[in-house]
Image (tube, rainbow, N blue to C red):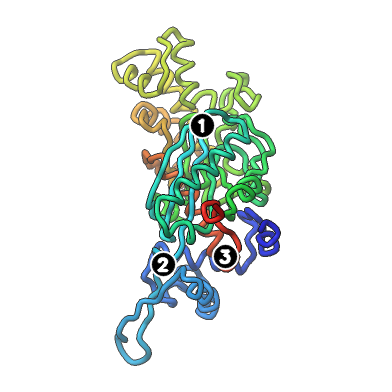
């Protein structure tokens, strides 16, 4: 099975899609986000010729990913046949791998979540996590009879440096993992075509297709919580960089000589703006020892000086880092999300001041900041949407894979 898949393409290729595969993915995305839509409009949205659209659409229609909806002719000529996504043809699994739990969903080709499940992780040992992932996949597939035969791919969203071309987790300070061939391990245990992506990148895919990034060519998703992450979409493309490390804003140094970061450097953004750094700053400056950022936010809103100063410092550091992002990439919008946004009211004043202070051009360079609390399932949905785009680009390949539940 593994060899069959590899003969048709890499396990997880990310930006390594061929021209024809990327064309198919772009066409499918246009139909997914705008459908029902005519071929002519798909050509206008993507910039491809109508002959290219016809060639790309043909295998997706044959595989059942897309359907044609007949319409009466509005004038002389043949009636139009708008394209739309077939919501019941195939399904994908999406999993968010967090330090203490797995969150899984089954999604249809419109990336709508049909079922979801959470599972605590008793250990971060790689073998344990892989076994729990296999078990959770089997649990999700067993929820409906049709899933066993029609789930065709598995998307994994995980924090850290992911080499998307080969599906390897190069380094995750949160998990303590290094050079883990995660896509290969999960392919061998689940039998599912597997795409591994950085979790914030997966979230950016979900926002691009269905959320605050829809219709915006260049935007960023920045998450604040256990760490600080960033997913970048520039001119409609998710940015990976040469080895998948683009967007590591949490490890931009904002306080030279500051606190030691989990990555080993000092003064990274995460040492000021992550949840645990805010809690540590409160205690270090004479405040109480707290266990959650929600407790800290409540204390700050009640007027505690130590808590308010810790959030103000976090906001200022975030603004400085976002200014670097604005100066380098110039996104139109930054979507601020993650667990830490429950305290966004305590961050925004200093964040806005710092962003304006450090951005080169105040006239056009400052991005719009949109705060969006998102559920755990949204990260998993992003992983599902990401693998869906890979599968769509080569629909016949997915038939080689068989879900783990189907092999039992």
Q: From the viewer's perspective, is residue 401 above or below residue 121?
A: below
Dot label at residue 399:
3
Residue at mark 1? 121
* Above or below for 4 versus 321: below
x and y percentages locating residue 87 in the rendered image? 39, 63
Mark 1 vs 3: CB contact within 8 A? no
Q: Residue furthest bottom?
A: 76
Of residues 176 and 305, the one drawn nearer to the viewer in this rendering: 176
Classify mark 3: helix, strand or loop: helix
360 w.r.t. 33: above or below: above
The residue lying at 54 percent from left, 41 percent from top is: 133
Mark 3 vs mark 2: which is more N-terminal? 2
- Label 2 packing within 10 angstroms: few (<14), some (14-19), many (20+): many
Q: Can you identify the residue that label 2 sits on?
A: 85
- In three-dimensional space, the C-alpha distance between marks 1 and 3, rounded to whole angstroms, equals 31 Å
Callout 3: 10 Å neighbours few (<14), some, many (20+)? Answer: some
Return the residue nearer the eye: 331 or 46.
46
Front label number (3 vs 2)? 3
Q: Residue at x 34, y 80 (%)?
A: 70
Q: Quadrant of the N terminus?
A: bottom right
Indicate which label's residue lies in the foreground, 2 or 1.
1
User: Observer-nearest residue: 150 or 156?
Assistant: 150
Q: Residue furthest top?
A: 286
Mark with earlier residue (1, 3):
1
Mark nearer the N terminus (2 vs 1) = 2
Element carrying mark 1:
loop
Between 242 and 116, the one nearer to me in the picture: 116
Q: Quadrant of residue 259?
A: top right
Q: Gap in Å between the C-alphas at discs 2 and 1? A: 35 Å
Separation (CA) of disc 3 from disc 2: 19 Å
């Amino acid at each position: 099975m593994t060899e069959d898949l590899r003969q048709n393409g890499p396990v997880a290729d990310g930006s390594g899609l061929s021209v024809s595969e990327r064309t198919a993915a772009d066409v499918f995305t246009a139909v997914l986000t705008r459908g029902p839509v005519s071929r002519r409009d798909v050509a206008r949205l993507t910039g491809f010729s109508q002959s290219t659209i016809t060639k790309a659409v043909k295998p997706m229609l044959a595989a059942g990913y897309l359907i044609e909806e007949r319409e009466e002719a509005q004038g002389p000529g043949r009636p139009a046949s708008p394209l739309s996504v077939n919501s019941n043809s195939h399904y994908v699994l999406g999993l968010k791998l967090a330090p203490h739990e797995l969150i899984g969903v089954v999604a249809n080709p419109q990336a709508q979540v049909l079922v979801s499940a959470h599972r605590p992780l008793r250990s971060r040992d790689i073998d344990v996590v892989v076994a729990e992932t296999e078990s959770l996949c089997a649990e999700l597939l067993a929820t409906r009879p049709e899933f066993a035969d029609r789930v065709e791919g598995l998307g994994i969203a995980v924090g850290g440096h992911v080499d998307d071309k080969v599906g390897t987790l190069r380094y995750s300070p949160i998990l303590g993992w290094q050079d883990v061939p995660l896509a290969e391990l999960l392919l061998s245990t689940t039998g599912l075509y597997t795409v591994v992506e950085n979790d914030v990148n997966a979230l950016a895919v979900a926002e691009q297709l269905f959320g605050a990034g829809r219709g915006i060519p260049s935007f960023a998703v920045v998450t604040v919580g256990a760490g600080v992450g960033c997913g970048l979409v520039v001119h409609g493309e998710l940015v990976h960089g040469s080895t998948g490390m683009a967007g590591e804003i949490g490890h931009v140094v904002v306080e030279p000589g500051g606190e030691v970061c989990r990555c080993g450097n000092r003064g990274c953004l995460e040492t000021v703006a992550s949840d645990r750094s805010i809690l540590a700053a409160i205690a270090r400056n004479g405040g109480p020892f707290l266990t959650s950022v929600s407790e800290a936010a409540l204390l700050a809103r009640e007027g505690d000086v130590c808590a308010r100063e810790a959030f103000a410092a976090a906001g200022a550091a975030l603004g400085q880092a976002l200014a670097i992002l604005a100066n380098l990439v110039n996104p139109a919008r930054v979507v601020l999300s993650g667990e830490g946004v429950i305290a966004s009211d305590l961050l925004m004043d200093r964040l806005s001041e710092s962003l304006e202070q450090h951005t080169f051009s105040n006239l056009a360079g400052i991005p719009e900041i949109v705060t969006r609390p998102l559920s755990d399932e949204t990260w998993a949905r992003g992983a599902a949407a990401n693998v869906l785009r890979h599968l769509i680009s080569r629909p016949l390949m997915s038939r080689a894979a068989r879900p783990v539940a189907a092999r039992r």
